[in-house]
Amino acid sequence: MTAASIKEKQSLIGTSVPRIGVDGKLNGKALFSNDVAPKNSLWVKALRSELAHAKIESIDIKDALNTPGCVAILTAQDIPGNNSFGIINKDQPLLAGSKVRFVGDPVALAVAISEDVAELALSKIHVTYTELASIFDPEESLAPGSPFIHEKGNLLGKRLIKKGAPELAFEKADVIIERTYQTTCLEHAYLEPDAGYAYFDSDGKIVIYASTQNPHYDQADVASLLGLEADRVRIIQTNTGGGFGSKLDLNTQGFLGLACYLLKKPVRMVFSREEAFLCTSKRHPLKIKYKSAASKDGRLLAIDVKIMGDTGAYASYGLAVVSRSAIHATGPYEVPNVSIESVFAYTNNPIAGAMRGFGVPQVAFAHESQMDLLAEALGVSPLEIRRRNALRLGSTTATKQELTASVGIQTCIEAIAPHYEAIRNKTNSKDSKKLKGVGLGCMMYGIGNTGTQNPSTAQVELQSNGGIVLYSGAADIGQGSSTVLIQIVATELGVGAEKITLVNADTGLTTSAGATSASRQTYISGNAALDAARKLKEAILTEAATMLKANRKKLYMKNGNVLDSSGVDSSVSFEQIANKAKREGRPLKWQGFFDPDTTPLDPETGQGKPYATFAFAAQIAEVEVDILTAEVTVKKIIAAHDVGKAINPESVKGQIYGGAAMGLGFALMEEFIPGKTVSLKDYHIPTFSDMPPVECLIIEEPEPTGPFGAKGVGEPALIPTAPAILNAIADALGSRIYSLPANLERVMKAIHSGASKMKFRLNQ
Amino acid sequence: MKHHINFKVNGDDYSLAVDPWRTLNEVIREDLNLTGTKLGCGTGDCGACTVLLDGRSVSSCLTLAVSVNGKSVMTVEGLAPSGEELHPIQEALIQTGGIQCGFCTAGMEMSALNLLNQTLSPSETEIKSALSGNLCRCTGYNQIVEAISMAADKMRDNAAEKEEQ
């Protein structure tokens, strides 16, 4: 490829093309999952367990069925197929059969003419339980003699990573820091509660409209629950009001499929906010015992990390979090000697699954706190210790993966360095009641699923009118993947974005793009779309060469035409090409495919290549702590993110702004307490008033295997923020918080501890 | 027993018989099929259901339908009724990138309009305070603040132009 051709090709890349679909979101016409059901739909409601662990002795549905307007009561015995689902482990029943495992486990469905009648019918179902001993702590869950939550036992999974000789390194270390960190259960709090609509189409297929991040997975699991071939179920993603990982699970889809299949009638379901809180997946609370060793010149020598995770009642995406939290425990640093053990257990808590970052935000809180503690012990600045240890080209990760390209962490650190120094030079007066602090947070994040095949496919078609249609299974949940995929295809084919029609996230019309998770759609589905576009381009140029009787190598595409660059004044339009190819029976719809180059991890040593590429970031948080009220105000966040290539810079910034907000919530206020938290009244997410200005610094270290060099940013955006805020609080107070969130109580404790160390005066 | 209510929505007259427990949100969405107004929580905590009632913002999920008898409701569908020309708030939200999933957007627009109905020179603090009842989980808010400020400028300019004419 010549330099000129690259330039020509990149015309839409790096351009903030307006997002597709915004008009409907602005004028109220965009249909979300609770906007699609017609009036004649029956309502589905779920009866959910109020006990955390209990054997179901009997379910008496007689009274419920007699409720006027109630059409059916469905229980586990009505499920025609395999009553267990889950994306990795199929351990979750759609309706509990023999026992319930958490408060919120569904035991029966009411189907009725209205939502009110369905609720009334539910209240008349009599379930007789025998309560079983409940376990709410993962360590207790794995202790000998604990009652089993699942027949196979209470261990979800374990990941070990061994590199070098950590014991030896700890013996030789100049400094050793050992601390324990605790994070809490978090709620995704997407604004759109789960909902959907299902009906039988004229071909006898069950069509389900759903708010989802993964239509093709939904299709397979709904079909399995119903004992059908996958092609008898069609999933269509509606506009999706945020997901952040929780809409990777089957939240309403299975219930809708079952009720529609058995009753042969259109059905709808919508979760109340309380139901969306209690019954959908959460972020895993992790307890992280972290021991780091460094030499006196500030080099990391070894880490020993033990992670204990609570996966709740069912696995969901838990296994992915087991491995990802272990792999990322080093942070974006080269550590020659590593011992990491990550163990997750089932408990009777709410299901913990995928939530933006898959365990990495939790471990980043630990590794970034450790870096600051090491810096303090060694008398070097937090910035300097990160510089010295950050990964670079040729570094190897904990899994002994050699990084050969696109390692932007050093560049990110240098980008924020001047800002950091400038803020750091502001000093606190000893008598101030509002103490300023500044903190750093760095991270790496592997793009795509961990050490497993996770391909994407796409098709690009030239239509007879010269228009181009892109087919992709990728669900855009608000992050902007649809616009990015269009930009990639439009650029490759030399047309404007408006010339591309996108058909996406409909299992009836598209093939699988895999999940919208793991920050993978730009990199993986972007590559699949690019592959399809390249093949179509080849086909178009071949047709054009024949039609123009030209040297194929001299042809190029522009604005829907193929032109000759050899000076001959001739061109042919896409429409003419399409008509000729069609007449002569040559295909104009081409398939693209991409699967990142990974290898599975060794079960004993954890060695392998879990990801084809990594994103990197460094953020600064500037805070002010009121030492009388313990209120923490974040004054500013500066975020440098290596995204490979920002295909749509505004969308990249959008992810960073939103990620910073979620990170701020994780740092300061969010905590889901099982049994107590039921709604947005007691689960606080950041509001307008909480958000400081966020400055984005986009760093582009091109990834050679990425579409136009792109990697991903969705989850990376969130990861460094909480560590940066916690380090800033520690900087302000001279005293550190080890459990999240840093709520008023914990901050007040840290204030008193800081005051007692004579860092500042609390009382005049 | 159903109650008879007469009210306006986006300038159109409606006459309905409604159960006394039904909310304005439910009636707008289910009976009038205006689904642009969302239901995010049902408890007045998220702001996604915000509409204007006689020009002032209310949570439609906490407003009983019977209470709007004789009143005038404006929903997101009424913001740019022609559909051709966008409202300055809408234009600004596109320009600043203040929309991601879009579920909170209608409520944001209505709360913003409520503020701009009162002042066309809101400070950043006033914007943040006026919209603090509207939650967004995607955008981190800053681009929405910027958009409202931009829309205020545009509306002020438009008003000044009108005056000159």
Image (cartoon, rainbow, N blue to C red):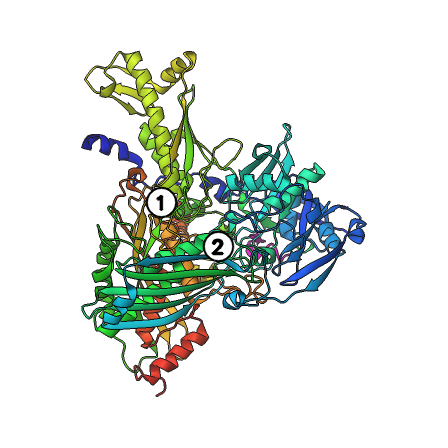
Question: Relative to the observer, which residue lies in front, A199 or B26?
Answer: A199
> Which residues lie in the magenta part?
B49-64
Task: Check disc 2 and give the amino acid type.
Answer: Gly
Q: Which residue is mark 1?
A: A599
Magenta region includes residue A301: no
Discs 2 and 1 lie in a common subunit = yes
Task: Say which mark, if any, is on residue A318.
Answer: 2
Residue B78 placement, left or right of A226: left
Residue in the picture at 39% in, 17% down: A578
Residue in the picture at 41% in, 73% down: A631
Q: Residues within 10 Å of mark 1 (few under 14, many from 20)?
A: some
Picture layout, residue A210 above or below residue B129:
above
> Which circle's residue, 2 or 1, is located before the other in the chain?
2
Residue A630 placement, left or right of B111: left
Quarter location, residue A741: bottom left
Question: Relative to the observer, which residue lies in front, A17 or A72?
Answer: A72
> Tag 2, which chain?
A
The N terminus of chain A, quarter of image:
top left
Residue in the picture at 31% in, 61% down: A338
Q: Secondary structure at mark 2?
A: helix
Task: Say which mark, if any, is on residue A591.
Answer: none
Res. B153 visible in picture: no
